[in-house]
Amino acid sequence: GCTKLKEVTLPSGLKSIPNNAFISCSSLTEIEIPDSVTEIGDYAFQYCGSLTEVTGGRQLKKIGYEAFQYCRKLESITLSSTIKEFSSYIFDECDRLKTAGPSSGDYNIKIGFTGNIPDMPFANSELENVVLPEGLTELNTSAFGGCTKLKQVTLPPGLKSISSRAFQSCSSLTEIEIPDSVEEIGDSAFQNCGSLTEVTGGRRLKKIGYEAFEYCRKL
């Protein structure tokens, strides 16, 4: 609640940023997370309405519940491949985080994940366009669930599975091309995608889960 706090220098060697650490620091414009930090706690930067950029954090393992919620000016953050645990609503109401893609590209959220995308990293975010990096083999549970503004997704070649609720309630998504490498689409993966009109690809699919496309009324 330090509403006049504009600048913070975090010490090298810091291991974690506690719950509520910088909540409602509404004048804070940027933050560099030391690479020693492994965890960002619940609500740590919630309501930091002037925050535009988050850098560092190359050894992060966990980001807590609503950690960056209502950071409406946040435009740039990189998610390291080391992160294995996300809580929900991390980027909820972050209006300027509209694009996500490989670290080498010009995206608001730079995706460093390799192998798999963990559960829920982008759930309920304001993303509109996503390009997933090559090298990913699995989208875990609710990876993009509840992203109601998501219009376009590019899935990478080599992807093996789309887990349960991965794109559930992505109500603005109009089409999706499933790479031919994908063998399984999980339960409720595209449930309630009410604008979805076309699904292409998926020539090597072996399993489509329960209610995978339920309530896709325009499909």
Image: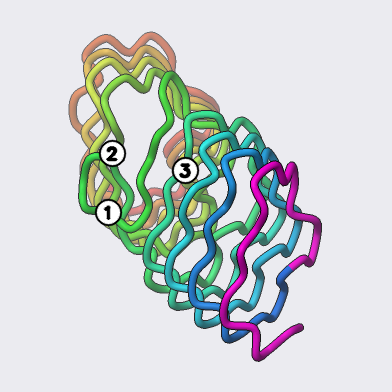
Q: Magenta stretch?
A: 1-21
Q: Is residue 161 left or right of residue 107?
A: right
Residue that mark 1 sits on: 107
Q: Quadrant of residue 15?
A: top right
- How many marks are shown on the rendered structure? 3
Q: Residue at x 37, y 15 (%)?
A: 160
Q: Compare marks 2 and 3 and give the one earlier in the sequence.
A: 3
Instruction: State the scheme by which the image is colored.
Output: rainbow
Q: Which residue is mark 3?
A: 79
- Which residue appears at 49% of the width and 48% of the height? 56
Quadrant where the image shows the N terminus: bottom right
Q: Quadrant of residue 198?
A: top left
Classed neighbour count for the residue bearing mark 1: other residues with Cα under 10 Å, few (<14), some (14–19), many (≥20): many
Q: Main secondary structure of the magenta part?
A: loop
Amino acid at the residue labelled 1: Tyr
Image coords of residue 115 (percent x, y): 43, 19
Vertical arrangement, residue 29 with respect to residue 141, above or below: below
Report whether 201 appears left or right of 151: left
Q: Are marks 2 and 1 in contact (CB under 8 Å)?
A: yes
Which kind of residue does numbered mark 2 sit on? Pro
Disc 2 marks which residue?
A: 102
